[in-house]
């Protein structure tokens, strides 16, 4: 378990959902890591789609005592189905125009993989992606005079790595211990 630290962070305790949300920015502020901790120790079955709560108006900057376990997780994703679903189809067909990459005609992309590694340590959170090239440490916060909230992740929780500008979820994971 990471030692407890006190930071200013974007925080929201939803009584309705019975969960605490903690958003920590990366130094570029282009990305955020959101931790979603159920109030009940066995309460990780969120029925609501969490995406709609990641930008909720109830988030506010608060002083938060944070304790999150150290962990690492890695995932490899095939991006072709996602990109085709988003309308990028020509790139994967024989009619692709890749003359800017190679003078050869008839080239197309057959596979596009993304590998994401998330590493949470006492120094912060690092997220590395082979296709995005993200590698930033979470920005250390300054204290603000306000009552302190607790975010003690001593039971299963969810975590979400999100790119803010396009509101794109890069990775959703679950920590169970």
Image: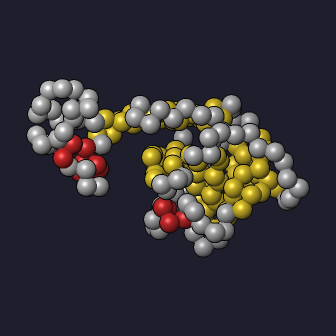
Give the quadrant of the N terminus: top right
Foreground residue, 32 or 34?
Answer: 32
As drawn, 32 above or below 39 = above
Q: Is residue 145 left or right of residue 161?
A: right
Foreground residue, 100 or 7?
Answer: 100
The residue that appears at 18% across and 26% down in the rendered structure is: 103
Foreground residue, 18 or 138?
Answer: 138
Residue 26, how many percent across, how many down?
A: 62, 41
As drawn, 50 above or below 25 = below
Task: Single out the residue that lies furthest toward the bottom.
Answer: 16
Task: Single out the residue that lies furthest toward the top.
Answer: 103
The quadrant where residue 124 appears: top right
The quadrant where residue 149 appears: bottom right
What colouring does the structure picture have?
A: secondary structure
The residue that appears at 17% across and 36% down in the rendered structure is: 108
Residue 135, how many percent across, how many down?
A: 55, 32
Q: Is residue 98 left or right of residue 136?
A: left
Residue 5, how many percent across, how many down?
A: 77, 41
The residue that appears at 41% across and 31% down in the rendered structure is: 130
Q: How many marks?
A: 0
Residue 59, how many percent across, how many down?
A: 67, 63
Q: Is residue 155 visible?
A: no
Give the quadrant of the C terminus: top right
As drawn, 38 above or below 72 = below
The residue that appears at 74% across and 36% down in the rendered structure is: 3
Q: Is residue 84 left or right of residue 1?
A: left
Foreground residue, 21 or 177?
Answer: 21
Q: Is residue 106 visible?
A: yes
């Amino acid at each position: 378990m990471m030692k407890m630290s006190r930071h200013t962070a974007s925080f929201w305790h939803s009584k309705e959902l019975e969960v605490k949300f903690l958003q920590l920015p990366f130094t570029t502020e282009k990305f955020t890591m959101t931790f979603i901790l159920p109030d009940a120790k066995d309460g990780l079955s969120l029925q609501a789609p969490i995406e709609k709560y990641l930008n909720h108006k109830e988030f506010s900057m608060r002083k938060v005592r944070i304790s999150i376990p150290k962990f690492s997780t890695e995932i490899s994703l095939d991006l072709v189905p996602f990109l085709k679903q988003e309308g990028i189809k020509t790139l994967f067909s024989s009619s692709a125009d890749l003359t800017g990459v190679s003078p050869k005609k008839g080239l197309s992309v057959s596979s596009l993989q993304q590998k994401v590694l998330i590493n949470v340590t006492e120094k912060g959170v690092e997220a590395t992606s082979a296709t995005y090239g993200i590698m930033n440490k979470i920005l250390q916060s300054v204290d603000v005079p306000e009552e302190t909230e607790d975010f003690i992740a001593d039971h299963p929780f969810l975590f979400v790595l999100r790119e803010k500008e396009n509101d794109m979820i890069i990775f959703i994971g679950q920590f169970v211990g």
